[in-house]
Image (tube, grey):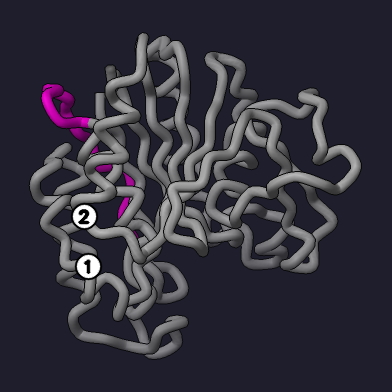
Amino acid sequence: MLVAAAVCPCPPLLVPEVAAGAAPELDAARAACTDALGLLAAARPDRLVVVGPAESGGPEEYPQGTPGSFRGFGVDLDVRLGADDVPGEADTGGGPRLPYGLAVAAWLLERTGWTDAPVDGLGVGESLAPEQCARIGRGVGARAGRVALLVMGDASACRTLKAPGYLDERAAPFDAEAARALGAADPAALTALDTALARELKVSGRAPWQVLAGAAEGTSLNGTLLYEDAPYGVGYIVATWS
């Protein structure tokens, strides 16, 4: 049963080594993410499931210890999901590797010293329909014991002229509704987010958020919005459900 959730953005720029000189610009977002993970630890989960965007439709599962890297961003930095001492194929370069959103989650967990519960990773892509995401989420929420979710994903990438997706006047209203739904722990509103519009606005969080909506069905969690801003023209949202 789902007992808590944290929603965080997943830009590689959240990692100071990747952001380099621009790192201080996301200090507030990093602090909010740290607070959100603190709430997950306080919920005393038996298992943490990290859900994030994936290039394939998915769902793709990533066990604890799966490696990820920021070398593609010019940084000699490697991470592992939930632990850095789990042996496996990754030690010799084989096996699955974390998509970037889950790699950012692994970095957040390492940064906060997460040891509170075993960790599983789940990648979901934008090709999944809301009903599919909700069904995946219901399966996660139905797992035995106390389950917590760390949900990674960005809002639109079209908030300014210099944004990755250029300026789109529909972006700010979309992000405002997503922030409201996440801050209010409103599963119905998350499920109702427009899939086609989310794709046009380059929203990476739509599918992960709708997995959260499915996992939260039948619960009575309360939401808190910790952070909402659009540095670099991309919407970043941090929220907690407990």
Q: Is residue 4 visible?
A: yes
Magenta span contains residue 225: yes
For the image, the number of numbered tags is 2
The numbered dot on residue 8 is none
Q: Is residue 23 left or right of residue 201?
A: right
User: What's the residue type where badge 1 is placed?
Assistant: Thr
Q: Tell me if mark 1 has few (under 14), some (14-19) or many (20+) residues whose alpha carbon lies within 10 angstroms of its own.
A: some
Near-viewer residue (175 or 200): 200
Look at the picture and state if 155 lies above or below 164: above
Q: Is residue 132 left or right of residue 180?
A: right
Percent position of residue 234, x then y: 40, 70
The residues colored magenta run: 216-229
The numbered dot on residue 130 is 2
Query: Which residue is found at the position 42% from the left and 35% from the top?
Result: 150
Q: Is residue 186 left or right of residue 199?
A: left
The disc, 1 or 2, on the residue closer to the chain's N-terminal end is 2
Q: Secondary structure at mark 2?
A: helix
Magenta span contains residue 224: yes
Query: Which residue is found at the position 82% from the left and 37% from the top?
Result: 89
User: What's the residue type where badge 2 is placed?
Assistant: Pro
The N terminus lies in quadrant? top left
Percent position of residue 113, x then y: 64, 24
**Tag 1 near tag 2, CB within 8 Å:** yes
Query: Which residue is found at the position 46% from the left and 74% from the top?
Result: 232
Residue of label 1: 195
Percent position of residue 208, x then y: 35, 49
Look at the picture and state if 155 lies above or below 16: below
Query: Which residue is found at the position 21% from the left and 40% from the top?
Result: 213
Residue sticking out furthest to the right: 92
Near-viewer residue (6 or 112): 6
Q: Is residue 9 visible?
A: no
Percent position of residue 37, x then y: 46, 29
